[in-house]
Amino acid sequence: MKKLPGSKNWSLISMAILITIMSISSSCTKSSMSDMTGTGNTDETKGTGSPGTNEVWIQGMAFTPSTITVTAGTTVTWTNQDMVVHNAVSSPALFNSGSMAKGVTFSFKFSAAGTYSYTCTIHPSMVGTVVVN
């Protein structure tokens, strides 16, 4: 079999691309992201402790708290504290935060009683619930 000129270079380039793809996909797991927190905010009280009343933090590849209970008429605010982009999308379609980079917030006012499930469609293992009384 005759070797084509430059075929060794293409093999090396292909190998490098494959390794890069594999390392990117493995770096986006829950366990590897669990220590990535912070708000990108200059307020030093943000990013420490736990979310305040009617707040959900997106951190460590999870919604914290995963279930929040509020009264009708309450506005809930999500804040992305991870280094990666997330979103919060309800099912059925009631709200959609759009892509949220680190430090970005999204708020939604819950007018009616009910249980509202949502997920990060970028990372479908991330799920949460808002219970409205």
Image (cartoon, helix red, strand yellow):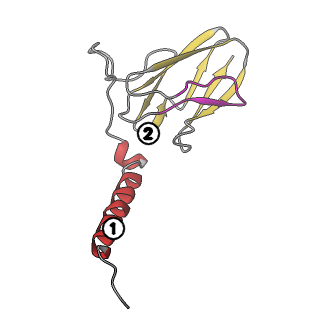
Who's the residue at 67% across and 27% down the image?
Answer: 116
Name the quadrant of the C terminus: top right
Q: Amino acid at mark 2?
A: Met
Which comes sooner in the sequence, label 1 or label 2? 1
Percent of width and height locating residue 23: 34, 56
Residue 45: in magenta span: no
Task: Kindly indicate the quadrant of the structure image that contains residue 121.
Answer: top right
Residue neighbourhood size for the residue with mark 1, other residues' Cα within 10 Å, grouped as few (<14), some (14–19), many (≥20): few
Q: Residue at x 38, y 91 (%)?
A: 1
Q: Main secondary structure of the magenta part?
A: loop
Magenta-highlighted residues: 86-98
For the point 42% across and 21% down, the residue is 104
Q: Amino acid at mark 1?
A: Met
- Counting from the top left corner in percent of width and height, residue 91 is at 69, 32
Mark 1 against mark 2, which lies toward the viewer? 1
| x then y, percent, for residue 92 | 72, 30
Considering depth in this image, is 80 or 52 the residue closer to the camera?
Answer: 80
> For mark 1, what is the residue?
15
In 3D space, how far apart are the residues under numbered discs 1 and 2 (Cα atoms)? 30 Å
> In the figure, is residue 91 to the left or right of 103?
right
Q: Is residue 9 left or right of residue 21?
A: left
Residue at the image point whose x is 53% and y is 40% from the top:
122
Would you say 72 lies left or right of 123 here?
right
Residue named by callout 2: 61
Q: Residues within 10 Å of mark 2 (few under 14, many from 20)?
A: many
Q: Is residue 31 above or below residue 132?
A: below
Foreground of the two, 113 or 29:
29
Secondary structure at numbered mark 1: helix
Q: Does the stretch in magenta take in 97?
A: yes
Q: Is residue 75 above or below residue 7?
A: above
Residue 123 point in image, percent of width and height = 51, 42
